[in-house]
Amino acid sequence: MLGLMHSTDPADDRADRRGNQVESGLRLRGRDREVLAVRDALDAVRGGRGACVVVEGAAGVGKSRLLAELDEMARRSGFDVVSVRADELDQYAAGAALQSALQSSYGSHHATAATDDQRLWLLDSITDALEVRAQRAPVAVIVDDAQWADPATLFALRTLPGRLAASQILWVLAVRPDTERPIVARVREDLERLGARWLTLGPLPQQELQHIAADVLGAMPSPGLSRLLRGVAGNPFLAIELVRAFADTDAARTDMGEASLLHDGIPVSFRRSVAMRVNQLPEDAVRLLQIGSVLGREFDLGTAARMLGRQVGSLLSGVEAALNAGLLSADGPRLAFRHDLIRQAVHENLPPAVRTALHREAADSLRGFGARSAEVAWHVVMSGGPVDDDAVTTLTTAVRELSSSAPDAAADLAQRVAGLLPPHDRRRISLLTDAAEYLGRTRRVHEALDLVDVTLPEGLEPLQEAYLRLVAAEIHQAAGDDAAAMTHLQQALALPALPAELRARLLKTKATGHVYLGDITAAERTGPGLLETSYRSDDPAVIVSALVFQSQTSFYRGRLAHALELAEEATRRAGTQPAALYLRPPRIPALWLATVLTATDRLADTERILREGQREAEALGLGWSLPHWHAARACALLEQGALDDAAVEAEASLMVADELEITLPIPQARSVLALVEIRRGDLGKARDHLRVAASGSGNTQRYGPLVSLARAGLADAEDEAGVGAAALREHFASREPTRLLALPPSQWPGIVRIALRGDEPSVAQGVAAALRSLTAQDDSQQIMGTVGAHVDGLLHRDTRALTSAISGYRSTGRPLALAAACEDLGELLAVSDDTTSAIPYLEEAGQLAAAAGAERDQERIRRRLRQLGVRSAPVRSHTAGHQEWENLTESEQKLIPLVVDGLTNRAIADRLYVSVHTVNTHMKHIFTKLGINSRVELTRLAIERGVGAADGFV
């Protein structure tokens, strides 16, 4: 059971803070180097920088004792200490113990997440609480026995030290090196990558063990006892226990100090010493200890009494004897073994058959009295099966509870439970299907699909196979591999006697897949009557989903007004029907509405829709949708010519996607970043972004047009126009508007420009034909006519068309599109020797590029003006040296006074009405540009420059 402790009062009794430590009266021996290291870490955090320390060592080597020393040092230094202590039973627990510890004195502003994925909600909740505390005092977060921590807490430990690196927080983890849990290994890897200080506690020298023995005895140990100490392999806890066990007996003169070890790492001598101490106790105490060792390090006396068939009162003498023998402690509401090695020794002294039977009985007893399913599940797993129906129900509940906060751990448990069931048990297939679904939410997508492939040949019933293939299709779609998804869907739909509801789900997923693949005709033909059936549904989410689907098909057909009407209706309905909010991207109505708006004259409304939708998703804990919101905002901001803010949103998308292990939006975000860097002039960064964007196996299919545009833009910038034009051929040679509409309209003239420079006239003509088709079907949007004029001007070298485009762009809120048209017209006039008319257009283009931060565009235009005899100021590089406040963007400047005012990132986000992840990204940029790494340093620099809490940026 988790031990959660928080205290800010240095006078608190240490035993109340850390019930598992060795008596405080004993001096910490042989760890001077480690104590100095943790003192340095405390000093670093007091100085304003976050730090992380991992204490690694075998059981009993002194990890908890060192953490107790650190705890005391931190409190004396004014730290707010948050302690979490894990237990073996926590490995299948839902929720986060770290969050529970923090909530003891902090009420999160978040409502409880009512979603199937609470990971980001948990991270944000813990982040907010820690940021608030770190504003008042430096914080030390101490997690003991982290190898047993609940999966959600481990998820937080993987992520938050990096996210909160600029806050005054010291993270300290104690962990055993021999853990077999994959998630613990990943925590180790991530913290090592972040630069955590690693303290490996090895065995103590014999001399230090002699000093420890002297501390316990008050005098140097006898030669016999000294020989005995050699058998503890340098383990200080074992040394103390052996000294206590044998100091006053003849055992010290026996040959029990052999260094031989059991398979579990417990010395023979220690097991014998524990057995000796137990056997000297009354029978009630012996039976209590044996049952307690099965129940866990901490256990409820009532549960132990039920398993013994006794009344609690009849065990009081046994409890007293175990306490007096120093084997148990009773500092909290439950009895606890004074150290887990004692519990383990008692547990291992039980015959294996007795152990497994007792674990099975413990599971039954705990289940009967409503214990948490994670605790029951641990006992069932420890019993090794077989499992009855009640046990399977409990285990399945544990899996489902765990899935929202730790889907990978839920998948592992589901597979473990499935292994306890007979091969043809229907519940086994259901568990494996769930396991595949949960793995599909993580980076372990290949494991999920491998599990599907292994399970499918098992002679499944049609219904089981259909559900499994639906899960596989959704995993493929989530990863962007729409073609593979369609294969599973077609095979599932060919199965006989499927329920109507399941068949409808399969058809809807297939129809959506056709949309993603750009085959709108196939999407419209999928499932006769599917839309009519959906609109008659009693489920509001089904109706909203149908509206979005119909809006998507109308949009890609070029019927923009109708698509906008349907998207607005879907968004309106979703706002009044909470169930409809949980649709997956990009079927979230407001997210899709923003996509449609970006292609219309209502571009200004896009930012409002995205901000409101993004913040609502955060408030509701819909973490899985946030990378898509950020990526959509990045695209919209790029369309508005706000390059810096577009890059921040794209980076925020990648940051959240990395935390949640979501791969789908990566090509979209990386392509936006590549396009931004091309305009800024950092082609190396653009190349790196495109390399990552193209690294996924299938997820470039859906964002293929955007990736191709960025790749073509990079090639063109590197004077390889032919390569760039060839990159455009696959998606834009067609005269249908479908693929063109996958991009915001201001990007379309760029396709034509690169195609003409690279001698691919078919691509340029295809774009022009698609635009004519669009305006013929729907001429309600001025932007379409404006872009059409721009394209015609490029294609036919028509100055009147370009002049018309410039006039149209002036009211669209697309400054970089206006800059491009001005440059195109200026260049066309210049080559026709109308220099006088060309210069004003080129100058306006340069000014617009400079305002947007498009330094490469600005420099190109500046060179052209110089050729025409016009001198202008040199371009100021976006990547100028560090420690220059002038490099901060307007959005970054807005944050500085709020940081000086002491607001947390969450409070800043609320004040500026943006996502907290946007603020996190801005803060990272500020630190990089100023060459600092903490909020304390930022505040000091700001005050030195006269930026106060109520001031603007100066």
Image (tube, rainbow, N blue to C red):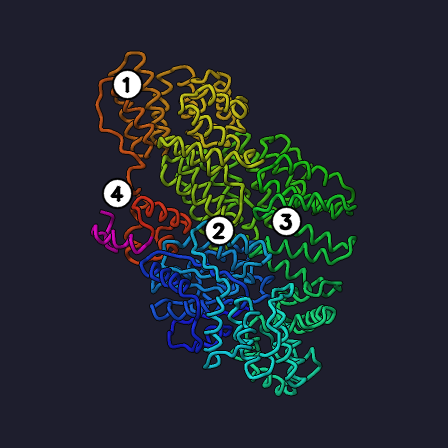
Three-letter amino acid code of the residue under disc 1: Ala
Q: In percent of the image, x 47 and y 55: which residue is there?
A: 619
Which picture quadrant has residue 318? bottom right
Q: In percent of the image, x 51 and y 73: which residue is there?
A: 20
Relative side of 378 to 717, left or right: right
Determine which residue is flagged by label 4. Answer: 884
SS category of the residue bearing label 4: loop
SS category of the residue bearing label 3: helix
> Neighbour class for label 2 at 10 Å: few (<14), some, many (≥20)?
some
**Depicted 32 relative to depicted 714: above or below:** below
Asked whether the viewer can see residue 867, the reply is yes
Upstream in sequence: badge 1 or badge 4: 1
In this view, the mark in front (4 or 3): 4
Asked whether the viewer can see residue 505, the reply is no
Residue 945: in magenta span = yes
Determine which residue is flagged by label 3. Answer: 437
> Neighbour class for label 1 at 10 Å: few (<14), some, many (≥20)?
many
Upstream in sequence: badge 2 or badge 4: 2
Looking at this rendering, what residue extends furthest in the top direction? 833
Closest to the observer: 496 or 190?
190
Q: Position of residue 552 (x, y in %)?
A: 55, 36
Q: Where is residue 174 in the image (x, y as percent from the top left)?
A: 49, 62
Upstream in sequence: badge 1 or badge 2: 2
SS category of the residue bearing label 2: helix
Closest to the observer: 116 or 250?
250
Magenta highlight range: 934-954
Upstream in sequence: badge 1 or badge 3: 3
